[in-house]
Amino acid sequence: MNRWRVAIVLGAGSLSLPAQDALQTAIQLDRSYEDRSTGRFLPPEEGLRTGPVTYAFTVGYGLEWNDNVFYRKDNRESDWIHTPQATARATWQATRDSVVSVGVGIGYRKYLDHSELDRFYVSPDTALFYDVPIRDWVITLYEQASYSTDVLSQGALSGRAEFPRFENTVGFRALWLPDRYVIGFGYAHYNFVSDGDQFSYLDRASEQGFVRLGYRWAELSQAGVEISGAWTRFSSDLRGDNRNLSIGPYVIWQLTEATDLSLHGGYTYYEFDADAFDPRDRDLSSWYLSLDARNRLTDYITQSLTLARLVQQGVNRGTSYFSDFIETLSAQYRLQWAFHAQGTAGCDLFYEHSSEPRGGVDETYDRYGVGLALRWQFTRHFFASAGYRFVWKDSDTDLFDYRLQVVRLEANYRF
């Protein structure tokens, strides 16, 4: 590599950190760097131009029907949710190898029958990746910020209409690629801030780090050993801090031009400090597994399969406990079909088996789900989408069971 390559991307992707934060940060950085270095990242389509800067302004309206707004087994309540929204994006193609893109969205969620849930929101949902290759090194600086009220992504939650939170991750990664070898290390700082008092006991900051030693037998294929860990500090004095360490082998393998997979597994250890409800220090010895396979079946059909067994921070609390952790085994299959030059369709299936200690008693639950999506580009500026999702949670504590159906229609106009 004889020149610097810069890729600064805001709004083109996100780092989701649901479990074993340091390990998942490293895995998703692998994916995002692969997409950028192989040219899979493309700047968003823009509409207006001022000199070297292009702009996209989008206004839209979403209509959603939810047949179980509060995620309950009994006394189910449905509602129609109206969401007018607008987004703005500016993109600067500074050089042939660099792009800076900044975007933000604002909107309002209006519930027809449950006005107490009405909410105005600002959605940064941004991601920044800055790659600087220097000889055998690749230095990546990154930041990701997102705001969400989504409950479906948190299987342990029941009886809640929203889970409002802001998350931000900032850090760096350094990869040294001398000949066939791979030496990597990185650091990230993660913040979780709840929006409101209901989940303030989850407010926290984490320091994350990882080290990787590997061998490459092809340009995009490698195997080795990785170590990751995190130190999590909660804002509330009532909660005890915790630390975790994970170690195990990994394989990143480009099987064919159309198929690649990533496999990680090993041992993980958590140590929890005493809190207001439990004066004892506690620990957990467990194991993790993460398999992600992606395949381009044809020029128009892509599919992926994800299997994972991970440990994440607990999310529930009761009158005499804070939940320390959740152990989750999950599987998800996704399929996307570009059936027309103007249309795409997709579906996904998932299964999740989880256990969360709640005051000395474990809640064990299974979740099953299916989602369908359709998008059609009517004109260069006008496009619409439709989606359906069904989720069923079956807990050994009947109180936490629920079944949910969501239908969403959305129309957008880009200037």
Image (cartoon, rainbow, N blue to C red):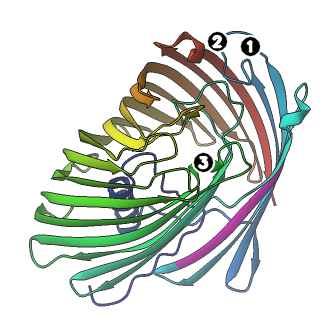
Q: Is residue 218 left or right of residue 55?
A: left
| Looking at the image, residue 382 lies above or below residue 55 | above
Q: Residue tagged by mark 3?
A: 201
- CA neighbours of label 3 inside 10 A, class few (<14), some (14 to 19), many (20+): some
Name the element at disc 2: loop
Cβ–Cβ under 8 Å for marks 1 and 3: no
Q: Residue tagged by mark 1?
A: 76
Foreground mark, 2 or 3, reads 3
If you read the primary sequence from the N terminus, does the residue marked by circle 1 or circle 3 appear first?
1
* Residue 106 magenta: yes
Q: Which residue type does callout 2 highlight? A: Lys
Q: Is residue 109 left or right of residue 287?
A: right
Q: CA distance from mark 1 to mark 3?
A: 27 Å
Residue 247 image offset from top left, x and y in percent: 18, 53
Residue 388 image offset from top left, x and y in percent: 64, 24
Magenta segment: 99-108
| Looking at the image, residue 325 lies above or below residue 188 | above
Image quarter hosting the N terminus: bottom left
Q: Residue tagged by mark 2?
A: 73
